[in-house]
Image (spheres, helix red, strand yellow):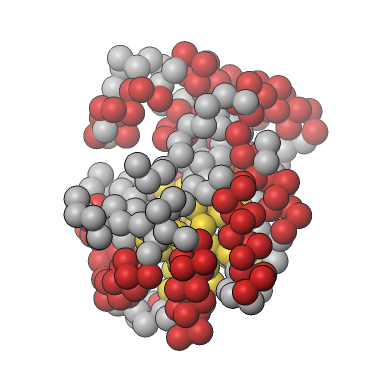
């Protein structure tokens, strides 16, 4: 396993992380715990979750799985998404973040979070309020580092400016959707990260499975797939993305690797990327994702992947989680 600094911080993270939004949902408790242990045994120590994943069950399962192994784990969670329908059940206000941090610590069975991330930009709360709250968390020792997720480039830059002006803890990372099927972050966010020393943490690296080659049509539902469990995912199976999946599978076959491993290996070569979050709903998917670390990409392959995915630099993003 390779370990990289998370942006310009001193935190070392495994270049392959484990996404856990399926835990307690598409993956039951026992399966989820096996996935976590397999990831840790394979050198993956960056575990990414959120307070809203499966209603808090993801955090609870992680807490149980890492009992006795907390020292091996870089634990990242998020807050700011909606936890209910009430006016106080969401956003990045001091009240909501303080409440959600305490609940996440309880569910995870720990007294500190390695990376605490704001899940999405909150247009109704001043950034200064959010950043002062996060700074308090860091000073208290309950949070080690802070990051953002789903921020636009201007929102992230504004936050960095406020932190510098007020001498507050600074975001060290940003978590956006990024893959061969979604390269919109390369327009503004990647240059910002390179300039400001922000670590990029891509989620949806396989575009929900499209880049594994498993989908041939919106009407064909592979058993156990995201489409099988989440029928609304069919909206993302556009002809252009399905064709990209076929092209990636073709290149992977020529190289003797899997399409998923090829797609993750491509991301690991991209500027500013610190760690790639790859989800799993079965233990064998962890082993499959780890194969990406063995893939060597030459200049010709990189150029071909760039060519076939170039339209997705300027297409609508594959995912952008925003508060309504």
Query: Left or right: 194 with respect to 149?
Result: right
Name which quarter of the figure residue 234 lies in: top left
Q: To which quarter of the image does residue 140 belong?
A: bottom left
Q: Which quadrant holds the N terminus?
A: bottom right
Q: Is residue 169 visible?
A: yes
Q: Image point 52% across, 27% down: which residue?
A: 316
Quick check: 215 above or below 68? above
Inspect this view and state whether residue 284 appears. Answer: no
Which residue occupies the extreme bottom position in the image? 140
Locate residue 242, reporting x and y percent: 47, 19
Q: Which quarter of the image is occupied by the C terminus?
A: top left
212, above or below 289, in the image: above
Q: Is residue 218 left or right of residue 156?
A: left
Using residue 321 as the reference point, say whether residue 64 is left or right of it.
Answer: left
Residue that sits furthest to the right in the current view? 299
Location of residue 319 in the rendering, given as x and y in whole percent from the top left corner:
45, 36
Where residue 26 sits in the image (x, y, percent)?
A: 25, 44
């Amino acid at each position: 396993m390779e370990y990289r600094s998370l942006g310009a911080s001193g935190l070392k993270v495994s270049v392959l992380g484990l996404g856990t939004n399926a835990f307690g949902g598409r993956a039951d408790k026992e399966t989820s715990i096996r996935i976590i242990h397999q990831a840790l045994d394979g050198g993956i120590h960056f575990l990414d979750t959120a307070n809203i994943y499966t209603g808090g069950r993801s955090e609870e399962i992680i807490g149980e799985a890492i009992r006795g192994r907390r020292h091996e784990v870089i634990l990242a969670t998020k807050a700011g998404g909606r936890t209910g329908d009430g006016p106080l059940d969401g956003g990045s206000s001091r009240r909501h973040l303080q409440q959600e941090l305490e609940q996440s610590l309880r569910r995870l069975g720990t007294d500190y979070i390695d990376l605490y991330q704001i899940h999405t930009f909150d247009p109704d709360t001043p950034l200064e309020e959010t950043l002062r709250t996060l700074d308090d968390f860091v000073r208290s020792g309950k949070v080690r580092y802070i990051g953002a997720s789903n921020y636009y480039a201007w929102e992230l830059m504004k936050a960095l400016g406020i932190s510098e002006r007020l001498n507050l803890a600074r975001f060290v990372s940003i978590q956006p959707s990024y893959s061969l099927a979604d390269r919109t972050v390369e327009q503004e966010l990647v240059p910002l990260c390179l300039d400001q020393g922000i670590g990029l943490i891509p989620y949806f690296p396989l575009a929900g499975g499209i880049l594994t080659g498993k989908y041939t049509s919106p009407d064909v539902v592979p058993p156990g797939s995201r489409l099988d469990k989440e029928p609304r995912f069919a909206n993302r199976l556009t002809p252009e993305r399905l064709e990209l999946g076929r092209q990636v599978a073709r290149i992977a076959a020529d190289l003797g690797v899997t399409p998923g491993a090829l797609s993750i290996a491509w991301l690991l070569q991209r500027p500013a990327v610190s760690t790639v979050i790859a989800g799993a709903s079965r233990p064998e998917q962890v082993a499959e994702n780890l194969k990406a670390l063995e893939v060597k990409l030459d200049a010709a392959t990189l150029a071909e992947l760039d060519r076939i995915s170039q339209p997705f630099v300027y297409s609508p993003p594959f995912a952008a989680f925003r508060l309504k």
